[in-house]
Amino acid sequence: MRNFNSLSEPEVLALAISLEEEDERVYADIAEGLRQNFPGSAAMFDGMREEESGHRRRLIELYRQKFGDHIPLIRRQDVKGFIYRRPVWLIRPLGLDTVRNLAATMEMETRRFYEAAAQRSTDPGIRQLLDDLAQEERVHQVRAEELEEDKLEASIKAQEDEANRRLFVLQIVQPGLAGLMDGSVSTLAPVFAAALATHSSWDAFRVGLAASLGAGISMGFAEALSDDGTLTGRGHPWVRGLVCGAMTALGGVGHTLPFLLSDFRAAMTIAVLVVIAELASITWIRNRYMETPPLSAALQVGLGGALVFVTGVLIGSS
């Protein structure tokens, strides 16, 4: 990799052209990735892509005037000091917060590059253009807000916010809720059966920990391998699997941890209270994100939890 200070003036201009071309293509990829779910934001990034294209044309015209037609290939990864950017196709499906943060990073990095390049330039024409581009990158965020006002009317913004919420529910809440329900409910029977059968807090803890981690691993792989999200829009399979597996383990570990107490009765009492809190949390999540009526959610979750709990008590007491 080259050090930035070692670049000649033609090489600095060539790097600037490469940066603008890359940013233009990134904005085009973002716009294409958002077009189906967020058409208004896609139009906004189309506008930003056109601006980057204009920057590139101005740089190429100045380079030809100063140094001729041959522009050497110097890329971001060839020069020290630039931030690594993951390709847009690796971070799909795209969320609004993700792409806005990416755009903010791109604008800041490019602005700093132009400021540093302008300070090193000895040619008045080149220095003027680099200063102008640095200023344009500084106000790019303002321009983006103007584009947002032009392209995103109140009704479109509301639609995109709702679409963003649906994607969050589909890709994060649903697999997390499925894991939390499975971990909280399915581990009740082995934990309380072991506790009542042995009257040993440590034995109950070991059984509960094994059941929770085993269920988490199983549910995580099952979710990750269920589909790749291409057709269903459920997001990256391994992200879903990680969320589902972690929430499954968490759901089981919650009412297992009280059995670290040596006092068996105290451990049982706290574990039962934790179970009630877990089922209440699941009921709230179902009502908040899945729009299940509170009474219906409470009956569904409570009935399932009660049946599994009673099963564990009966087996452990037999």
Image (cartoon, rainbow, N blue to C red):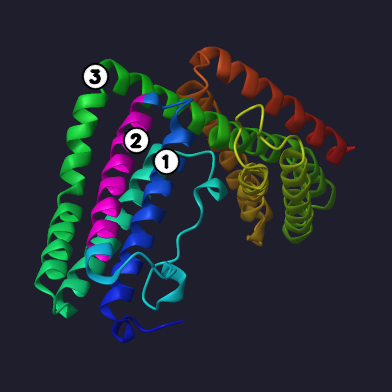
Please count the marks in the image: 3
Q: What amino acid type should be assigned to the residue bearing mark 3? A: Ala
Which residue in the protein does label 2 denote?
Answer: 46
The picture places residue 89, in percent across and down from the top left corner, at 55, 46
Give the secondary structure at mark 3: helix
Q: Are marks 1 and 3 in contact (CB under 8 Å)?
A: no
Which residue in the protein does label 3 denote?
Answer: 154
Point 61% across, 32% down: residue: 234
The quarter of the image holding the C terminus is top right
Q: Quadrant of residue 282?
A: top right
The stretch in magenta equals 40-63
Which numbered disc, 1 or 3, marks the residue that appears first in the sequence?
Answer: 1
Which residue in the protein does label 1 denote?
Answer: 28
On the question of residue 276 being in view, the answer is: no
Of 71 and 18, the residue lying toward us:
71
The picture places residue 286, in percent across and down from the top left corner, at 53, 24
Query: In screen coordinates, is 282 left or right of 21?
Result: right
